[in-house]
Image: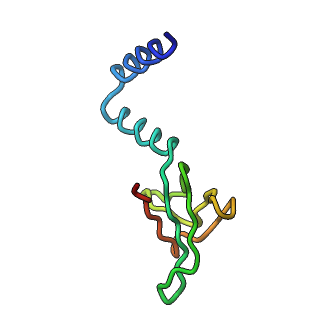
């Protein structure tokens, strides 16, 4: 019964929102749900120095006015726990299963 009430509430909420608002909510929900990711640090010569796995999580950073990541990426890896690496030397790939 609780799930049914939740579904009706969400349907009512989404019907009252504009399409742009719904799109923003779904993007935020995607961030909250997380993904399986491989995050790699790249050296000056272009070779991968180290890689981490992020399971059902997310990688965050600050954004500039254009929406581009700046500064550092922050995430929690399965291998080492908390990691902070520079945006400019990072490759993020989604792990497809």
Q: Quadrant of residue 15?
A: top left
Q: Quadrant of residue 16?
A: top left
Q: How many marks?
A: 0
Q: Can you give x and y, in whole percent of width and height, for residue 21 in the image?
A: 37, 33
Q: Residue at x 57, y 63 (%)?
A: 73
Q: Residue furthest bottom?
A: 45
Q: Residue furthest top?
A: 1
Left or right of 84? Residue 59 is left
Seen in the picture, residue 22 relative to 14 is either above or below; the reply is: below
Q: Residue at x 52, y 13 (%)?
A: 2
Q: Can you give x and y, in whole percent of width and height, for residue 38 in the image?
A: 50, 64
Q: Quadrant of residue 78?
A: bottom right
Q: Residue at x 44, y 13 (%)?
A: 4
Identify the image quadrant of the C terminus: bottom left
Seen in the picture, residue 85 relative to 59 is either above or below; the reply is: below
Colour convention of the picture: rainbow
Q: Can you give x and y, in whole percent of width and height, for residue 55 in the image?
A: 55, 53
Seen in the picture, residue 2 relative to 75 is either above or below; the reply is: above
Q: Residue furthest right?
A: 81
Left or right of 61? Residue 29 is left
Q: Residue at x 49, y 90 (%)?
A: 45
Q: Residue furthest left?
A: 19
Left or right of 62? Residue 10 is left
Q: Can you give x and y, in whole percent of width and height, for residue 48 in the image?
A: 52, 80
Seen in the picture, residue 29 relative to 65 is either above or below; the reply is: above
């Amino acid at each position: 019964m609780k799930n049914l009430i939740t579904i009706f509430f969400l349907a009512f909420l989404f019907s009252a929102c504009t399409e742009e608002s719904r799109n923003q909510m779904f993007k935020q929900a995607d961030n909250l749900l997380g993904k399986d990711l491989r995050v790699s640090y790249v050296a000056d010569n272009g070779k991968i120095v180290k890689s981490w796995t992020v399971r059902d999580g997310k990688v965050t950073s600050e954004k500039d006015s254009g929406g581009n990541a700046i500064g550092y990426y922050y995430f929690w890896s399965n291998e080492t726990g908390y990691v902070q690496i520079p945006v400019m030397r990072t490759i993020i790939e989604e792990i497809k299963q």
